Each structure stands twice: as C-alpha cells, then as structure tokens.
C-alpha cells in the first residue's frame, strides 16, 4: 500500500477524490432522482430570494444538517409546494411549525415536521462574488497557468528536471 501511495502524487489523489465526490453527487440527482444532494448527513442550498436578509443574502450557500430535531429561532430548510424554503422558526405548536423570513412582514403557512429537510448550521457568504470571479476567462487561465507552474517547479519528479546528455 505504501508503494502505491508513493507512486501516486498528492495532486492526482486530490483530483481522484474530487471526481469521486462529484460522481456521487451527480448519481444522487440524476440516477437516484433525489431532489438534493446528501453527503455525510448534510446538504447545501443556494439562497435565491432576499427573504432572510440580513442574516442570509441572495446567492449565499447554506449548509444544512439533515434533521428534524429543531426548536424555536432555528433557521431551517423545508419543502413547500415543490420548492425548498429557508426561514426561521418563530413558533412550534404541537405538530405545526410556523416560520418566517427575517425580512418578511408576515408569517408563512404552518408546516409539518415531516416537511423539514434540516437545520442550517453554516452560511457561506459572498458566494455570488466568487462565482462571478471564477467565471471570468482571465481568472481561469491564471489558475491553470499557476497549477502548471507549481507542477513544473515542485511536484514533477526530479529525474525529469535533469538535462539529458
């Protein structure tokens, strides 16, 4: 096993792991028909409305722990009429849970505990900026040139760097 790990460089191993994760996520959505990706008890969603401003902004990513163990004031994601909604719990009455977006003036219609996908545990802010930056061709070219330069200078086997006689 050690010999195999020595032969596979870190970058290749990293890319293989990324490929496995992406394939797993793709299979969940396309092959198994799930509505969202589940990975190690968590999922994530991109927020598309401003109903939770200033806590969660449009295009922020929320990481959601898959659970129905929630309490008042938790921010949850639930399914409502085919859409996923991320709002704060303002009241729990028996089997009915009442939520409201922080920026909204009115409460949402009550939901059942079974509608809950999970509780928001982390918010990744400013994703919109990073998406825009990473879509820029100049940035993509700069990243690729940097990766190749690092590989040529540091990762490539030393035997390849010696001039041949």
Image (tube, grey):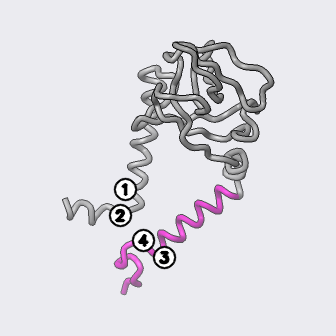
Q: In the image shown, does 140 or 49 lie closer to the viewer?
A: 49
Q: Give the mark, 3 or 2, whose residue is nearer the N terminus.
A: 2
Q: Which residue is mark 1?
A: 13
State if disc 2 and disc 3 touch (CB < 8 Å).
no
Picture coordinates of residue 38 (x, y %)?
A: 45, 32
Q: Which residue is mark 2?
A: 9
Residue 153's tag is 3
Q: Secondary structure at mark 2?
A: loop
Taking 159 as reference, is 109 above or below it? above
Taking 22 as reference, is 134 above or below it? below
State if disc 4 and disc 3 touch (CB < 8 Å).
yes
Residue extending farthest right: 105
Label 3 Cα neighbours within 10 Å, binned few <14 / some 14-19 / many ≥20 = few
State if disc 2 and disc 4 touch (CB < 8 Å).
yes
Picture coordinates of residue 3 (x, y %)?
A: 20, 64
Q: Secondary structure at mark 3?
A: helix
Taking 90 as reference, is 8 above or below it? below
State if disc 1 and disc 2 touch (CB < 8 Å).
yes
Residue 152's tag is none
Report, in whole angstroms, how far the alpha carbon at label 3 lies from the one at label 1.
19 Å
Report, in whole angstroms, how far the alpha carbon at label 3 lies from the one at label 2.
14 Å
Report, in whole angstroms, how far the alpha carbon at label 4 lies from the one at label 2.
8 Å
Q: Which residues are magenta?
A: 139-165
Picture coordinates of residue 12 (x, y %)?
A: 39, 57
Q: Is residue 45 left or right of residue 58?
A: left
Which quadrant, please, contains the N terminus? bottom left
């Amino acid at each position: 096993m050690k010999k195999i790990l020595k032969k596979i460089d870190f970058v290749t191993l990293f890319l293989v792991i990324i490929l496995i994760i992406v394939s797993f996520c793709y299979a969940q959505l396309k092959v198994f028909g799930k509505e969202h990706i589940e990975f190690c008890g968590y999922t994530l969603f991109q927020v598309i409305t401003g109903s939770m401003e200033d806590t969660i902004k449009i295009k922020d990513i929320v990481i959601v722990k898959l659970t129905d163990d929630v309490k008042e004031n938790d921010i949850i994601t639930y399914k409502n009429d085919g859409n996923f909604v991320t709002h704060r719990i303002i009241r729990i009455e028996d089997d009915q849970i009442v939520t409201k977006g922080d920026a909204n003036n009115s409460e949402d219609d009550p939901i059942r505990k079974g509608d809950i996908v999970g509780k928001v545990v982390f918010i990744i802010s400013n994703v919109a900026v990073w998406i825009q930056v990473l879509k820029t061709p100049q940035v993509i070219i700069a990243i690729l040139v940097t990766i190749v330069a690092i590989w040529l200078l540091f990762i490539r086997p030393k035997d390849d760097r010696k001039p041949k006689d």
